[in-house]
Image (cartoon, grey):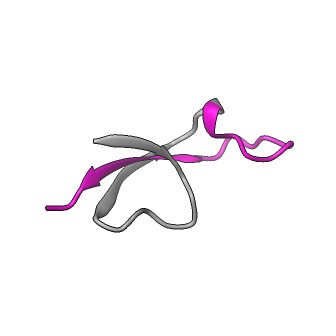
């Protein structure tokens, strides 16, 4: 498993298993508390 900041789509070869909020992934100057990070699992 890998945790990554959410972008528009998950990387090829990985599936999103869950999403959550983390302050380390805030991109905008107006932070929101919606989920902005993913837990990813590699697809075999």
Instruction: Determine the residue located farthest toward the right in the rendered image.
Output: 29
Which residue is depicted at the point 20% across and 61% down? 43
Which quarter of the figure has residue 13?
bottom left
Which quarter of the figure has residue 21?
top right
Asked if the stretch drawn in magenta spans residue 32, the answer is yes
Q: Is residue 8 toward the left or the right of residue 30 in the image?
A: left
Q: Which residue is at the front of the view, 34 or 38?
A: 38
Q: Which residues are magenta?
A: 24-44
Q: Quadrant of the C terminus?
A: bottom left
Q: Dominant secondary structure of the magenta stretch?
A: loop
Q: Which residue is at the front of the view, 5 or 18?
A: 5
Q: Is residue 12 above or below residue 2?
A: below
Which residue is depicted at the point 58% across and 34% down? 22
Residue 23 place in picture, x, y as percent: 65, 31
Q: Is residue 30 toward the left or the right of residue 5 in the image?
A: right
Q: Which residue is at the front of the view, 33 or 16?
A: 16
Instruction: Determine the residue located farthest toward the left in the rendered image.
Output: 44
Instruction: Determine the residue located farthest toward the top in the rendered image.
Output: 23
Q: Which residue is at the front of the view, 19 or 5?
A: 5
Which residue is depicted at the point 59% across and 47% down? 36
Q: Quadrant of the N terminus?
A: top left
Q: Is residue 38 toward the left or the right of residue 30 in the image?
A: left
Residue 34 place in picture, x, y as percent: 64, 46
Which residue is depicted at the point 74% across and 43% down? 32
Residue 17 place in picture, x, y as percent: 32, 52
């Amino acid at each position: 498993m890998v945790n990554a900041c959410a972008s528009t789509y998950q990387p090829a070869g990985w599936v999103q298993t869950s999403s959550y909020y983390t302050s380390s992934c805030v991109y905008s100057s107006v932070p929101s508390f919606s989920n902005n990070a993913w837990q990813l699992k590699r697809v075999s």
